[in-house]
Image (cartoon, grey):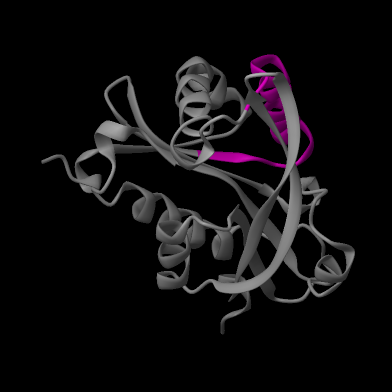
Amino acid sequence: MMRATDLTLTVCDATGFAAWETRFMALYLEAFTSGSYHGHYLDEAAERAWLRRLFAQHRARCYLLHEGTTLAGFLLMADAAYDRKLPADMRQQLAGQQVWALAELAVAPAYQRQGLAARLLAQCLADCIALPRDDEAASCGTTLIVRTQADALGAHRLYERYGFAWWGEVQVPVAVLQPEGLRWRQVSKHYYRCAMVRLECVV
């Protein structure tokens, strides 16, 4: 059985991501329209544009686990300002901190249950405390937040194992394909957060 440690981990900025974008989009569209996301509709052109904005405007970083040119899994993070669904009262709780958001995390079906998500998350957390702060007035606190499906219990357990705590719940409009056509419905999402101290502040 392939182990997560047997795969190559590559961290991409916008330039590096461009070489992987086609393979990333294939897994992205598969992951978020199947399983617990069955029936969800994603417009590929709109999703590509959103991803490019994350890199251009929100300092996105993409973590890729791959076997040669085969993409096995990915994690995408960006500064949390991109998340317009985060309620104002929750955002206010993070004032003065460096805040990153785990925007997307997916593993290809053939590579699931082999520790890939854990390896991606561990690397992301390590980088969050090592990255320099973007505001000299900010405190030493760094927080990583994630919004996940309310019924994604496996994901919840993973986040809790890595120090995340449940933070809140929101209702998010989602496009769903139904026999009569495209419809919108409200879906419950849970926020988790992990509070850390940046390495530069540790004496």
Q: Quadrant of the N terminus?
A: top left
Quadrant of the image for the C terminus? bottom right
> Where is residue 156 shown, x and y percent of the image?
47, 63
Eyeballing the image, is 73 above or below 121? above
Magenta stretch holds residue 44: yes
Q: Which quadrant of the view contains residue 101?
A: bottom right
Residue 191 drawn above or below residue 185: below
| Side of 41 where 153 appears, left or right | left
Which stretch appears magenta?
Answer: 41-62
Q: Which residue shows up at 29% across the image and 42% down it?
A: 112
Q: Where, by quadrant of the figure, is residue 89 drawn?
A: bottom right
Measured as percent of width and height from the top left, residue 27 is found at: 45, 26
> Relative to residue 9, is residue 53 drawn left or right?
right
Q: Could you tell me residue 120's position as x and y percent?
A: 41, 49
User: Which residue is at a point 67% across and 24% down the rendered structure image?
Assistant: 47
Residue 197: within the magenta? no
- Counting labels gives 0
Q: In this view, does 28 lie to the left or right of 99?
A: left
- Drawn side of residue 201 relative to residue 11, left or right: right
Dominant SS in magenta: helix
The answer to which of 41 and 182 lies nearer the viewer is 182
Q: Which residue lies furthest to the left in this view?
A: 1
